Amino acid sequence: MARDLAIDLGTANTLVYMKGRGIVLNEPSVIALNRQTGEVLATGREAWQMIGRTPGYIVAVRPLRGGAITDFEITERMIRLLLQRVGVSRFTRPKVVICVPSAITEVERRAVTDAARRAGAADANLIEQPMAAAIGADLPIGGIVALEAVRVGSFDIDAAIQNFVRREHGIAIGERTAEEIKVAIGSADPTPDEHQAEVRGRDLMTGLPKTVLLTPEEVRYAIEDVVSSIVASVIRCLSKAPPELSQDFLVRGMFLVGGGGLLRGLAERIERETEVPVKMSNVPLEAVVLGAGHVIEHYDALKGMFMGARR
């Protein structure tokens, strides 16, 4: 018998929740393709390990960037592979709930639901990531009253680090190395116990391997434009919210969810600039898929949360 599924189609990570079992898959949203034949060589963590380490005709593709679907065909192939990996076949056709960005267009909405149905879902519905995250964080929910979408995130932080290291230290590094730097010493605000990190890359002058030391201050400077645009979007969203919610904000505060919320110092930076308390969700990376999973477990009672159902 088919077990219904919830999928968090994130730009960086894809998570799958199976009814009655919980989270059954959590992997990078990457597919490795043979550019010459179109063959899918690997997905998820295996494909992520191949980035920057394969011949030119093998490419690692991210079908989602900046909170938007950049390649519909690859997205459909990724959904199909996800469903296959968790046991969906033509004999087991589950209902699927997919978490998507609130700013998704009508065309993108149709593309995602059609892709899920073609990949083997008996039915596919969408739920906005902020709504799913609120459910997953155990917050009292009503509806989305204010929305501000910015198409920047973790990949932009990685790219900013790559550009900085290239410009200031004269070495080229790959996106995997940039992400490792972000995780190791990246921050949005000064934090206790900071330390330098060794960075290995290719010297732009000689072409030979080279190691440099990078400080947390340098990384903060490198990613400041991205971080400040995220903080500015929070401020704009707060200004759009109904005045009656101001008391709730000041008493309950805001909750930070999503993988990007794991950047050290981001909660403190937002709290300082908005003067509103900011709390980190207990499970920031999993909050969205857990919320969608809760909808799957209580499908009939919560199907009013789907995109389109409340409009």
Image (spheres, rainbow, N blue to C red):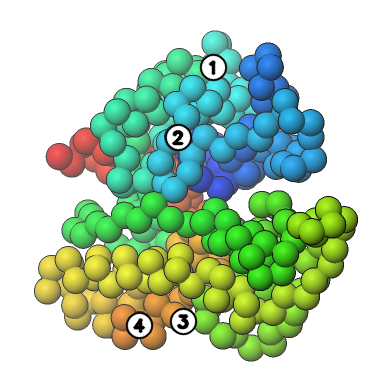
Residue at the image position 64 percent from the left and 88 percent from the top: 192
Q: Nearer the viewer, mark 1 or mark 4?
A: 4
Instruction: Examine the rendered structure and indicate whether residue 231 appears above or below residue 9.
Output: below
Q: Quadrant of residue 171?
A: bottom right
Residue 303 in view of the camera: no
- Camera-nearest label, 3 or 2: 2
Q: Residue furthest bottom?
A: 192
Quadrant in which the N terminus appears: top right
Which residue bears the numbered disc 4?
273
| Residue type, mark 3 in image | Glu
Q: Which mark is residue 268?
A: 3
Residue 52 at x, y = what percent? 74, 42
Nearer-N-terminus badge (3/2): 2
Q: In the rendered view of the protein, which quadrant contains the C terminus?
A: top left
**Which of the marked residues, 1 or 2, is nearer the chain's N terminus?**
2
Which of pointers 1 and 4 lies earlier in the amino acid sequence? 1
Task: Point out residue 13 in the picture as x, y percentages from the top left corner.
Answer: 57, 46
Label 1 to label 4: alpha-carbon separation: 50 Å
Q: Is residue 145 visible?
A: yes
Inspect the image, locate mark 4, and give the three-letter code of the amino acid beneath it.
Glu
Which of labels 1 and 3 is toward the front?
3
Q: Label 1 sits on what residue type?
A: Thr
Q: Earlier in the sequence, mark 1 or mark 3?
A: 1
Q: Residues within 10 Å of mark 3 (few under 14, many from 20)?
A: some
Image position of 93 (left or right of 60): left
Q: Which residue is mark 2?
A: 70
Gap in angstroms between the C-alphas marked 3 and 2: 32 Å
Q: Nearer the viewer, mark 3 or mark 4?
A: 4
Q: Residue at x 50, y 18 (%)?
A: 119
- Judging by the rendered image, the residue that carries numbered circle 1 is 92
